[in-house]
Image: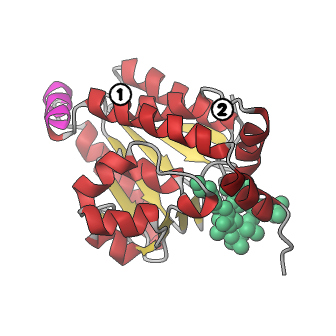
Amino acid sequence: MSDHIQIERHGAVQIIRMNRPDKKNALTRAMYTTMTKAIVDGDVDASIRAHVFFGVPGAFSSGNDLQDFMAFATTGNMGSEVIDFLIALVNAKKPLLAGVDGLAIGVGTTIHFHCDLTFATPQSYFKTPFVDLGLVPEAGSSLLGPVLMGHQRAFAFLAMGEGLHAVEAKEAGLVYKLVDTEELESTVLSVAAEIAAKPPEAMQISRDLLRMPREDVVERIKLEAKFFAERLQSEEARGALMAFLTRKKG
Ligand code: COA
């Protein structure tokens, strides 16, 4: 369990808050484990009707902790925490919402392919620098990205690592609505409460009908993970990770 994830309740809404501001909410293995447990436990708790992800002001998440990636690259052991989390996202039975302010990098971006509604402040920025890190897209984004935004935009975003400002992310369908910073949390919580007040069984079936079949997404996540694990051991990835971890800040 991780102190960097806070689980809160707002009526029938479970809030999963990433809270590691000094590292811009880079996600460690322990943070993934805590988030996975919250989703799985929340799904069997009838008093919870929706899950909401929040970050901290200025950082939704800077993605996977690059120190952990370096450890994977060195030891060859990826662990199961990341994949367990991604599969929990796909298998989540209740609506997933997110409120983004600021940076959303790597999995901090691809998580939104699994969210039913993502709200973002105008200064939010979404980016997936997978290829620049010698890596490949993850979290099923290689399957869900082209469906959501078309092949060319998905290529620019997921393969070229071209960032999307909030307005562009909304235009691409990754963000549902833009909200002023001071209204972000209250807006997301009020929409989540609105969802929570609807008949839960009909909501669950409707959501399932709208989503791509879970088995297809899980299969793609596993395929991506196979390449991802191989790539982490590559010279390209080790060089890029080392460059970040040893950079001198001005
Ligand atoms: N993993 C580990 N540490 C990270 C991190 C990550 N993904 N992202 C940020 N940090 C750490 C920085 O090393 C720094 O730590 P320090 O203060 O001990 O030196 C701290 O968080 C603040 O980051 P900093 O780079 O100083 O802030 P910034 O506002 O200038 O830039 C980012 C923020 C997120 C743009 C930049 O840190 C970055 O590019 N991070 C890597 C993102 C990434 O590649 N994620 C994986 C995608 S697959």
Residue sticking out furthest to the bottom: 250
Measuring from the top left, give residue 71's x and y in whole percent.
78, 40
Secondary element at image label 2 = loop
Check disc 2 and report the residue beneath it.
78
| Residue drawn at 65 percent across, 27 percent down | 79
Q: Quadrant of the C terminus?
A: bottom right
Q: Quadrant of ligand 1?
A: bottom right
What's the CA distance linking mark 1 and mark 2?
21 Å
On whether residue 131 falls in the magenta region, the answer is: no
Q: Does the beta carbon of the residue at mark 1 sit less than 8 Å from ligand 1?
A: no
Which amino acid type corresponds to the residue marked 1 in the rendered image? Asn
Question: How would you classify the magenta stretch by its main secondary structure?
Answer: helix
Foreground disc of the pair 1, 2? 2
Secondary element at image label 1 = helix
> Mark 2 or mark 1, which is nearer the start of the sequence?
2
Q: Which residues are magenta?
A: 200-209
On whether residue 202 falls in the magenta region, the answer is: yes
Measuring from the top left, give residue 19's x and y in whole percent.
65, 49
Which amino acid type corresponds to the residue marked 2 in the rendered image? Met
Q: Nearer the viewer, residue 138 or 110?
A: 138
Check disc 1 and report the residue beneath it.
91
Tell me the crowding category of disc 2: few under 14, some 14 to 19, or many 20 or more residues within 10 angstroms, Cα based: some
Measuring from the top left, give residue 91's x and y in whole percent.
35, 27
Tell me the crowding category of disc 1: few under 14, some 14 to 19, or many 20 or more residues within 10 angstroms, Cα based: some
| Residue drawn at 26 percent across, 62 percent down | 151
Say if 60 sits above or below 92 in the image. Answer: below
